[in-house]
Image: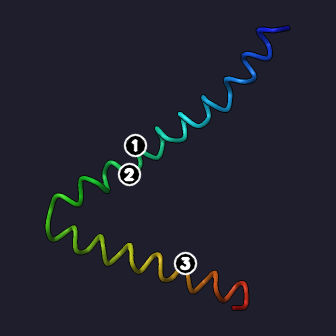
Amino acid sequence: MDSFWKNIIRYPRFFISSLVGLILVILTPIKNLFKVRKLRIVLVIALCLVFSSLYFILRNMFGL
């Protein structure tokens, strides 16, 4: 029964490490886009548009 609880305690650590690995794999192509000057400008503008639209959508949803 002791090994059962040791395995249960390992699951959150495995989940966090898997999630961090997934995030790194997803963000690697975006990091590579920053190496090209033209794409860097487009990417910064696109990220600003995404975050600003998300901000306005959430603001309207909460009625602020």
Q: Residue at x 22, y 68 (%)?
A: 40
Circle count:
3
Type of amino acid at the residue the image marks with label 3: Leu
| Disc 2 crowd, CA 10 A, few/some/many (<14, 14-19, 20+) | few
Quadrant of image for the C terminus: bottom right
Query: x and y percent of residue 59 in the render?
Result: 64, 86
> Decide: marks 1, 2 in contact (CB < 8 A)?
yes
Compared with 38, 30 (above or below) is above
- Amino acid type, callout 1: Val
Assess disc 3: are there few (<14), some (14-19) or many (≥20) residues with their C-alpha within 10 Å of its C-alpha.
Answer: few
Left or right of residue 49: residue 29: left
Task: Identify the residue position indicated by label 2 in the image.
Answer: 27
Q: Residue at x 21, y 68 (%)?
A: 39
Mark toward the start of the polypeptide (2 vs 3): 2
User: Which residue extends farthest left?
Assistant: 37
Q: Mark 2 and mark 3: span between their CA atoms?
A: 19 Å
Label 1 and label 2: CA atoms lie apart by 6 Å
Q: Residue 29 location in percent, x, y?
A: 31, 51
Q: Which residue is mark 3?
A: 54
Q: How is the image coloured?
A: rainbow
Q: Amino acid at mark 2?
A: Leu
**Image: 62 above or below 8:** below
Residue placed under numbered mark 1 in the picture: 25
Q: Secondary structure at mark 3?
A: helix
Counting from the top left corner in percent of width and height, residue 51 is at 47, 76
CA–CA distance between discs 3 and 1? 23 Å
The reply, left or right, for residue 60 in relation to residue 3 is: left
- Please say if the residues under marks 3 and 1 sit with CB atoms less than 8 Å apart: no
